[in-house]
Image: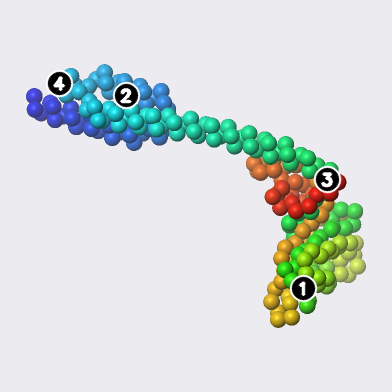
Amino acid sequence: MTVAATTSTTTTTASTASSSSVTSAITSQQFLNLLVTELQNQNPLDPTNSTDFINQLTSYANFDQQQTLNSNMGTLVSSLNSLLTLNSSNYIGQTVTAKTDTGTLKDGQISFGYSLESAASDVTLSVKDSSGNTVWTGSGTTISGTNSFTWDGTATDGTQLTDGGQYTLNVSATDSTGQSVYGYTTVTGKVTSIDNSSGTPMLNIGSTSVSTSNVIGVTS
């Protein structure tokens, strides 16, 4: 009888440990089925310890609450994404200014902008194509704060580049001591559509996509 009792205790303990370890990998129904089966097959001479039973019920309660929380969070995230997409659609047809250094050549121009943290003694601007080749270089205004630069799509050799290409503006701005005073670059253009394929609403300005969080100005 002593041997049987020892075996039963060992089995019960193993079952408890197993039950605690698999709660994250099974469904609520499966967990309840295991619990009921354990109670039905326990040794009448050595029933499941009440503490172990309470621990198993607690594990089930925590597991069930976690499953419900995960489901609710998923629903909340989905609703939030839908709301963000709906709000982003209000940008369509609007002209926005967003923090980005890349724009799409349209109607023979790109409206860039750049911010300087303080007045600069020298500002050099360079425009590169999508392959990283420099197609234009020139100087820019040195005023502290916001500066605008509209590139006319003409390369250094005088060639008029074709609409639709993406070009990046690089800004080098230094003060009288040689320290950089460059802040950030912007592009201004009309929003033509919204792209939510990545899960985050992106505004399309020509072939350029920008996040709504980078928008710093909107005009009709």
What separation in Å lies between label 2 and label 4 (alpha carbons)?
A: 19 Å
Q: Which residue is mark 2?
A: 35
**Residue 157 visible here:** yes
Mark 4 secondary-structure assignment: loop
Q: Position of residue 102 (x, y in %)?
A: 76, 58
Disc 3 marks a residue whose amino acid type is Gln
Outermost residue, bottom side = 177
Could you tell which of marks 3 and 1 lies nearer the N-terminus? 3
Figure quadrant of residue 168: bottom right
Give the label, 1 or 2, closer to the camera: 1
What separation in Å lies between label 3 and label 1 (alpha carbons)?
A: 31 Å
What separation in Å lies between label 3 and label 2 (alpha carbons)?
A: 60 Å
Whether 145 is drawn above or below 207: the answer is: below
What separation in Å lies between label 1 and label 4 (alpha carbons)?
A: 89 Å
Tell which of 110 and 142 is nearer to you: 142
Could you tell which of marks 4 and 3 lies nearer the N-terminus? 4
Could you tell which of marks 1 and 4 lies nearer the N-terminus? 4
Check whether the beta carbons of the residues at disc 3 and disc 2 lie within 8 A of each other.
no
Q: Which residue is mark 1?
A: 119
Disc 4 marks a residue whose amino acid type is Leu
Q: Which mark is residue 94?
A: 3
Check whether the beta carbons of the residues at disc 3 and disc 1 lie within 8 A of each other.
no
Crowding near pointer 4: few (<14 within 10 Å), some, many (20+)?
Answer: few
Disc 1 marks a residue whose amino acid type is Ala
Could you tell which of marks 1 and 2 lies nearer the N-terminus? 2
